[in-house]
Amino acid sequence: MDKASKSKILSRIESIKSQVEEIVATIEAERHENIGEDLMILQHLEDKKEILTQKIISLKESLTLAETTGVVEHTFVLDFNGRKKEVSVVLPALANPAKGRISTDSPLARALKDKSAGDIVEVNTPMGVQQYKILESQ
């Protein structure tokens, strides 16, 4: 894993940790001010805290995976309805679908796993089943 990718993941972890700390402080303030008057606010904050905590865990797992396997991305050139499309399968923390960087968790990435040039994969999407032919695998 290159330093820039690792730095980006670590930066996201720190940012999320800061958000969790802010939520914890808000929860404590709400508890002292309202003492049970608005349980919905407290529950919402607790839920948000849990979601952010799970994101931290996921980012740390992605970082560990990248450091132990050395794999950060795998690039495919696909034929989709007669058009070439290049996608890189990357760790979730590095995904940016608008730039062709799809998460390892995405349906397309899962379909591409262990496939090579010449293979055809089918992906279930909200618009129905889509077929992709793998032209290149790097």
Image (cartoon, rainbow, N blue to C red):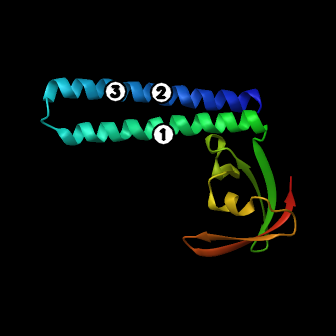
Res 26 → quadrant? top left
The residue that disc 1 covers is 54
Res 128 → quadrant? bottom right
- In this rendered view, identify the residue nearer to me: 82 or 70: 70
Q: Which mark is residue 24?
A: 3
Q: Residue at x 55, y 30 (%)?
A: 13
Q: Which mark is residue 73?
A: none
Q: Is residue 29 left or right of residue 51?
A: left
**Total number of numbered labels?**
3
Q: Are marks 3 and 2 in contact (CB under 8 Å)?
A: no
- In this rendered view, identify the residue nearer to me: 84 or 87: 87
User: In the rendered structure, which disc, 3 or 1, sits on the residue that comes first in sequence?
Assistant: 3
Say what secondary structure mark 2 lies in.
helix
Q: Quarter of the image containing the N terminus?
A: top right
The vertical placement of 15 against 87, above or below, is: above
Q: Residue at x 54, y 70 (%)?
A: 126
Amino acid at circle 1: Gln
Amino acid at circle 2: Lys
Q: Are marks 2 and 1 in contact (CB under 8 Å)?
A: no
The x and y percentages for residue 136 are 87, 60
Say what secondary structure mark 3 lies in.
helix
Amino acid at circle 3: Val
The residue that disc 2 covers is 17
Q: Residues within 10 Å of mark 3 (few under 14, many from 20)?
A: some
- Give the distance between the C-alpha atoms of the residues marked 2 and 1, in whole angstroms: 11 Å
Q: Residues within 10 Å of mark 1 (few under 14, many from 20)?
A: few
User: In the rendered structure, which disc, 3 or 2, sits on the residue that comes first in sequence?
Assistant: 2
Q: Is residue 80 left or right of residue 20?
A: right
